[in-house]
Image (cartoon, helix red, strand yellow):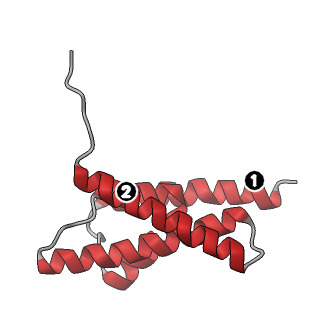
Amino acid sequence: MGTKRTLSPVKKQFGLIASIAVIGLGLTLAWLTKWNPYLIWLASASVITFILYGFDKTQAVHGGIRVPEIVLHGLALAGGFPGGWAGRLVFHHKTRKRSFTIVLWISTILHLILIYWIFLAK
């Protein structure tokens, strides 16, 4: 029998903080705008992803606590891929890590298909 794998406290904390931030920003945008709920989700996930890319870059430079890669990948897959692309461009962060490029491309393609299905395939 294998050992049970659990997330580290740091991964759980960053995941929880990111989730609360995305939901909080999403609820705020829903209250302030008349946007489509999917677009609100993409916008809020992207903003939080971008912020975490910047935070992680700062922490990398100064040797602080880092945002776990699984959190950044999860945010990209959940809809924060524009923020991930922007974070790479603005902060020059995670540009050499192939896994980030792959996850961002997969996320982009999946969400473009979803956008087509939601808005154009009628």
| Residue located farthest toward the top when viewing the structure as drawn | 1
The amino acid at mark 2 is Gly
> Given the image, on which type of amino acid does mark 1 rest?
Trp
Q: Residue at x 75, y 67 (%)?
A: 36
Local SS, label 1: helix
- Report the number of numbered marks: 2
Furthest residue to the bottom?
Answer: 90
Taking the image as drawn, is residue 101 in sight?
Answer: no
Q: Which residue is mark 1?
A: 117
In the image, is 111 to the left or to the right of 83?
A: right
Considering depth in this image, is 93 or 14 the residue closer to the camera?
Answer: 14
| Residue drawn at 59 percent across, 66 percent down | 42
Q: Which residue is farthest left? A: 63
From the top left corner, tell me how far across and down residue 87 is, in percent. Answer: 39, 77
Task: Please state the horizontal and vertical placement of residue 86, each as a whole percent of the image.
Answer: 45, 78
Q: In this figure, which residue is indicated by the disc labeled 2? A: 15
